Each structure stands twice: as C-alpha cells, then as structure tokens.
Amino acid sequence: MNKRVIGCMLACAALMFAVSVSTANADEPKAKNVILFIADGNGYNSDIMGSYWRTGEEFGLDYQKFPVKGASATFDVHKHSDGRAEWKEDEDGYSEKEFWKGPDGPNARPHTNCQTTDSAASATALNTGKKTLGGRLNISMTGERLENFAEKNFKAGRSVGIVTTAQISHATPAGASAHNMNRGNYEEISKEQINDLPISVLMGAGHPVYNNGKKIDKNADELNYQFVGGREVWEKVSANDGYKGWTFIDDRPDFASLAAMTPDKKEDVPKKVLGVVRTNGDVPPIDGDADDPESMIKRFTKETVDAIPSLTEMTLGALNVLAQNENGFYLMVEGGNIDHANHANNAANSVLEHAGFSKAIDAACDWIEKYSSWDETIVIVTADHETGQIWGAGTFDDDNDDGKWKAKDDTFNEFMPVPASAKGKVPDVQYMSGGHTNALVPVFIKGAGADSYYKFIRGEDKTAGKFWKFDGKYIYNSDIYNIMSAASGIK
C-alpha cells in the first residue's frame, strides 16, 4: 500500500472522527435559558417545613420532585490571624464526621482554612465558581476581580435578570451582578447595577419613599437612598424618562401588568425594567398562605397588599422581558427573607416566606412549559447556606424553658427529623442557632443539562442522605456555577 493511499485513509478517518465528535456535541443538551432560584438561609429541614406547610407532605412540592436531587456544601474561606487566606480543594471542605458529632457540629469550622459562609461569599461562589472570604462580592480571596456568570452571559449576547425579596443591592442579588470588597457598600453596589451593568431586569426592595406600601413620613433630605444608588441616581431613574434605558416601575399593578405580558401576545414589552417594590425593607410574603382558604393568614393591611407584588408576579414579569432575547437569558430569583425568619427563630414566618418562594418556582415551571421548553431551559433550586440549625421537636430538652438552645442549660438528645405536619400547620421544630451553619443545603435541578450535576460530586454524607432521602452525594456551592456553565455551553 503506497503512501498516498495510506494518507488518504488517515485523512478520511480523521474526517469521520471530527464529524462524529461534532455530531455528538450537537446532540448534547444546551440550555439557552438558565434560571437559578436561591432560598436564602434554607437548609433541608427548612425546606421540609415549607413543604409540610403547603402540601402536608415531607417532599410534596413540585420542585422537590425534580429529576436531580442532591446537596451542596456552602463553607467559605477562613482568614487567619496573620492575614493569610487559602483554601485547598483536596484538603479543605465539609466534614461529615464533624457535622454529625453533636449539637456543636453544624456550627463548627469544617477545616483549618474554611468557615461558615455568609451570603456574599456564597453568592460569589454560586456565580463565579470560586470560594472567597466572607463579605466579598465577586472578589477573590486574594483581591482579584472575578468575572461572574452574568458577565459571561452579556458576552454571549444573552440577557440577565435579577429578582429578589430583599433590597436589590443586598448580598445575594449583588453577588449575581456587582463587584465589591464589602457587601455593606449598598450605594456603590446599586450604582454599579443601575449605571454600569447591561442588566435587563432588576427587581426587589429598597424603596426610599415607601415601606410596606405606606409613604414614609420624612422629607426628601431625610430618606434612605443607599439601596438604589444614592439620591441623584434615584431621582434620575425614578423620573422614568429613559435614564440608562430603564423602564421604572414600583407599584403592584405595574408588576402585575408586566407579568401578564406573556410571549404569545404581541405586546410592547419593555427592554429593560427596574422594579423597586414600595418597601424599604423586605418584600412581605403577601401570598404566603398554604393554598387552603381556611388557613389563609390575613396579616397585611389592604394598603400593603394593594401596593406590594408577590415574588411570583416579579418572576413572571422578569421572564416576559428576558424572553425577548432569542439568544437566551440568565435569571436569578432569590427568596431572601427565609433567612431573616430563621435568624429570628420564627418558624411561622419562615413557612410564609417559603410559600411565596415555592409558588414563584411553580409559576416559572408553568411558564417554561407554555413559552419555552425543558429542552432549552435549566432550572436549579438551591440555597446559599442554612440558617437557624433547625431540627424536629425533641432534639433537645429546654430545661430552663427559655425557648432557646443553650449548651450549659439544656440537654441534647439526638438530631430529630422535622415531624409530619398537616397542610397549613407550622411544623413543630426547634432552633439551635440564630446564625448560619455548615449544614448541607438542598439542590434540585430539571431541564437541559441537569445531569451535569453528577460530574461535580465532591463527597458523600451517608447520614445526611438517610435524613433527607437522597443518595448522600454532594457538590460545593461553587459547582453550581460549573453546572450552569456546562449546561448552557458558556465557558
């Protein structure tokens, strides 16, 4: 066989291989739409509480039945007394042995170079794939600026939306967009969001003029503008005359109208929407009932309900705006106040906040099936960290009857699961902390590229798997970014 024939055969083989690889890659699911739902402060037991409240079942919510059910370790990087900050993937991380050893386990530092995370460091991990120090937003542990998933979507010609029940410049929405060494620099963060980033949708709280729908009784000089870029930016954007291309909305009827502008209607949908809900603090869960008319909790004034949109209305409005981009979009939706309720050890408020969050997921899934498809969209539901160290009643004996766990006063028995509870009834639980813990948090995924979760398994916690009915295998929160990148094809 002469060299020419051999060369021809080799060339043909190479061509066939290239075609087969190209075909295989073409067949891989690529999600042009990525939707990340973050329930702030929502560990597995908090998630179960929310399910019992709405369904009367331990895992009765639709998203809890997604094809992928797993968990995430959320720790961040520890800064040593000498100023050194380091984290080694092969040495540092979550410790099953440490966590389950007793009542102090969930609050213990996982390893020498790791500690319990805050929302800023976790949001950075979720959006950049990098662990960092607490309080930092898309800034590495050594001080470098990190490119986040939103920016990669901008470069790919896709749109970005951010929706939250907290202030728009709070840690989690800030982590999905802005860059800052200090999460408390709200005015700097919101200026970057409003002035400098090509975000298509930005919705949440922080209104300087209203709180819970009621006008604040202060003159203009006394109002708090820090969450909306400062007074000058606020006055320009709220004038609604096209500042930076924004369409500005702040009243519930405007959010409801946007939510009704579905892609099947030939309506003039705004290209960019800044929605600042009429409350300076948290967006109240006006739809936090358990879907049972007899258990409706009427705790809000008519003034509040008329002025404040639900998270569902905000989410649907955001989807309708983002859907205008044929290249696709990235949408981050945060239920930010589950965390606040759990910090306060208030289970009744926690399930209300959780209901509003879970209803927004239901609405988004319905929207996908009507106006997109699971072949081109991936939905990830997770949390940034656990808050409150929630366990079932009987975990400890409250020997001094103060309603709180104190190691020196109370008796620890064993970690108990959240007990079964009827729909519309708050489960009987005990809180053992008022802060964040190192508990694994839930991860639920459905849609194009969902199986990429299994490429990033970091370890296995068999006890957690038995407790919360999954295989025990977990990822790191930084791997959510890797999953979104792999599923969407954005490298």
Image (tube, helix red, strand yellow):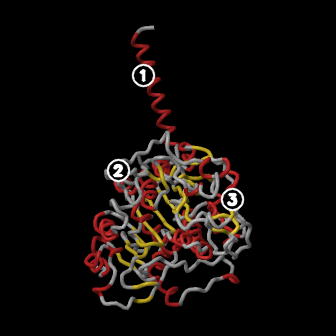
On the rendered structure, is 289 left or right of 214? right
The residue sitting at 59% across, 54% down in the picture is 105
* Residue at image location 43% in from the left, 81% down from the top: 279
Residue 204 can be seen in this image: yes
Question: Which numbered dot is residue 415?
Answer: 3
Q: Amino acid at mark 2?
A: Gly
Which type of secondary structure does the marked residue at label 2 adopt? loop
Q: Which residue is mark 2?
A: 83
Up the image or down, 490 lies above or below 258; here it is above
Marks 1/3: CA distance? 64 Å
As measured in the structure, the alpha-carbon distance from the residue carrying label 1 to the one carrying label 2 is: 57 Å
Query: Which amino acid, by three-letter code, is at mark 3?
Result: Phe
Query: Residue 177, image x and y in percent?
Result: 37, 61
| Residue picked out by circle 1 | 11
The answer to which of 252 and 220 lies nearer the viewer is 220
Mark 3 residue crowding within 10 angstroms, few (<14) / some (14–19) / many (20+): some
Q: Nearer the viewer, residue 411 or 161?
A: 411
- Foreground mark, 1 or 3, reads 3
Quarter assignment of residue 4? top left
Which residue does the image show at 61% across and 86% down from the upper left? 298
Marks 3 & 2, CB-CB < 8 Å contact: no
Q: Earlier in the sequence, mark 1 or mark 3?
A: 1
Of circles 3 and 2, the one toward us is: 2
Structural crowding at the residue carrying mark 1, measured as other residues with C-alpha within 10 Å and reported as few (<14), some (14–19) or many (≥20): few
Q: Disc 1 or 2, which lies upstream in sequence?
A: 1
Secondary structure type for disc 1 = helix
